[in-house]
Amino acid sequence: MRHLTVRNVPEALASLLDRERKRRGLSLNQTVIDLLSQATGVARQAVHDNGLGRLAGTWSAHDLAEFERVTSAFETVDAEMWR
């Protein structure tokens, strides 16, 4: 592995990178490597969380019941539309 130093990073870019690091829950180093890999098309060996992993399992039983209640109409087939 090579080490790389990047100098004179504009403050706006540094802030965006820090925000992205926090969103991904990764180190700044890993975030920059991932972004550079994506931008250049270089495939990564390991796939990291796509951002949805932190949301998995966060619903309570009440949340699930409410979701099922408000989406129950989607389970009904409108016979008039299928004639």
Image (cartoon, helix red, strand yellow):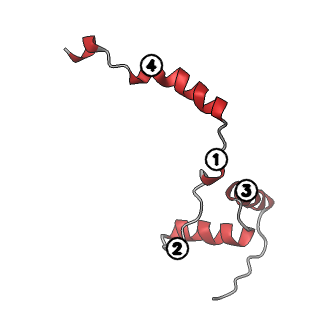
Give the total of numbered labels: 4
Report how far apart the C-alphas of labels 4 and 3 lie in the structure.
41 Å
Q: Is residue 61 above or below residue 52?
A: above
Mark 2: which amino acid?
Arg
The x, y position of residue 1, in whole percent, is: 63, 88
Mark 1: which amino acid?
Leu
Which circle, 4 or 3, is nearer the viewer? 4
Q: In this view, does 14 lie to the left or right of 41?
A: right
Residue appearing at x 52%, y 73% in the figure: 44
**Residue 16 bears which disc, if any?**
3
N-term-proximal mark, 4 vs 3:
3
N-term-proximal mark, 1 vs 4:
1
Q: Mark 4 points at which residue?
A: 73
Which secondary structure lies at badge 2? loop
Q: Which quadrant would residue 62 be assigned to in this image?
A: top right
The x, y position of residue 77, in whole percent, is: 32, 19
Which circle, 2 or 3, is nearer the viewer? 2
How many residues crowd mark 2 within 10 Å: few (<14), some (14–19), many (20+)? few
Q: Nearer the viewer, residue 31 or 73?
A: 73
The quarter in which the C terminus is drawn is: top left
The x, y position of residue 34, in whole percent, is: 60, 68
Q: Residue furthest top?
A: 80
Report how far apart the C-alphas of labels 2 and 3 lie in the structure.
22 Å
**Residue 44 bears which disc, if any?**
2
N-term-proximal mark, 1 vs 3:
3
N-term-proximal mark, 2 vs 3:
3
Q: Do the residues labelled 2 and 1 touch (CB within 8 Å)?
A: no
